[in-house]
Amino acid sequence: MASITLQNVIKRYGKGPSANQVIHGVNAAIADGEFIVIVGPSGCGKSTLLRMVAGLEEVSGGEILIGDRVVNDLEPSERDIAMVFQNYALYPHMTVFDNMAYGLKIAKVSLADIKTRVDKAAKILELGHLLERKPRELSGGQRQRVAMGRAIVRQPKVFLFDEPLSNLDAKLRAQTRLEIQKLHHELGITSLFVTHDQVEAMTLAQRMIVMNGGVMEQFGTPEEVYHRPASTFVASFIGSPPMNLLKAAPGARKGETMGIRPEHLDVGSTGWEVQVYTVELLGAERLVYARLGDESLIVRVEESAPVPAAGSTIRVAPREDRVHWFDTTSGKRLNA
């Protein structure tokens, strides 16, 4: 196991004035054994950052350290990392056992040691009964477990996951998330996990890096990111439904944007007067979509609460201790 340190990491494609910079000075210190999720929308640079750690992309500026070694100029095979890809990357003509053992055979590990490592990984991932099957005989979730098993047997210092759950359906994603959590709990290997899915980020991360346009917007625990977003981007990206961001709410000051999460607005006899235009039932709760002047507003209410009719007017009051303030121009958080 090893720590990972990113020191002012930059990535550019091309040279000179026409160079396209896609990663803008990322700094992060990741502790030995920590599970970090890099999350953001498509094109934000999260996979590029992961690929630089893996050695699959050159570093244009700054330094990447794995443990106390600067790895900028090391080949991927010299970094002591193992990567799990979105598309599984399994050899279709090989059995599960041979897929998991392949890297060890190339590294000339003894046959006895290979069998011990593969059997141990298969037990952790509940693949023992599938070792003689080919990938075409497996479900998507089973294939992804084989890909993780192939990484485990390498006994690396760092695991890198590049959107490994993207090809799975919702039920399998939830199941595999639990398996990844169990795996990290048992092995304790430093892990970087890339996803665009905020549910994966919130449930898996010990800490998370939120990326936007090649910039690290925030680095913190899921609780910190959700309850104290560093910018309007983080506030709108993390949370479903997103935080309400209001430029003209009562009490808002010029040049400032008020943020309030839907669950922190209380329906009652006092507060803002809002116009309801639709209501969604989501099992144990409802989402009330309304307008406050010219701005849209979402209110989350319990399923047992009275249902306001579309077109009706209701009053909602923000909880004062849950109000966030952001600079309208920069989007940065104002209140500490």
Image (cartoon, rainbow, N blue to C red):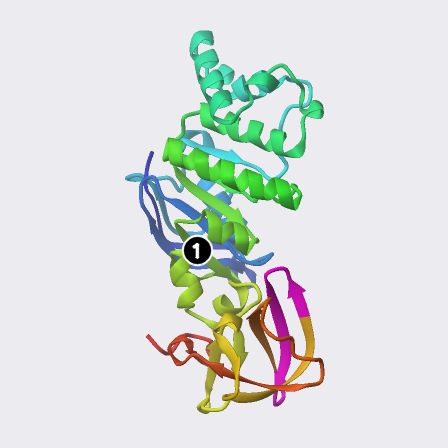
* Above-or-below relation of 91 to 299: above
* Quadrant hosting residue 25: bottom left
Residue situated furthest left in the rendering: 68
- Is residue 283 located in the magenta-colored stretch of the structure? yes
**Foreground of the two, 13 or 189:** 189
Q: Main secondary structure of the magenta part?
A: strand
* Above-or-below relation of 192 to 19: above
Q: Is residue 225 left or right of residue 275?
A: left
- Is residue 331 located in the magenta-colored stretch of the structure? no
* Quadrant hosting residue 81: top left
Query: Where residue 257 sits in the image (x, y, percent)?
Result: 48, 82
| Residue found at x 49% / y 37% | 180
| Mark 1 crowd level (few <14, some 14–19, many ≥20, 10 Å Cα) | many
| Residue found at x 45% / y 91% | 251
* Above-or-below relation of 316 to 298: below
Query: Where residue 94 sits in the image (x, y, percent)?
Result: 64, 17
Image quarter in which the N terminus is found: top left
Image quarter in which the C terminus is found: bottom left
Disc 1 residue type (three-letter) = Ile
**Foreground of the two, 115 or 227:** 227
Res 248 visible: no
| Residue found at x 43% / y 49% | 205
Query: Where residue 49 sits in the image (x, y, percent)?
Result: 48, 49
Query: Where residue 179 sits in the image (x, y, percent)?
Result: 50, 36
Q: Secondary structure at mark 1?
A: strand
Determine which residue is flagged by label 1. 209
Res 203 visible: yes
| Residue found at x 62% / y 70% | 287
* Above-or-below relation of 104 to 162: above
The magenta region covers: 280-295
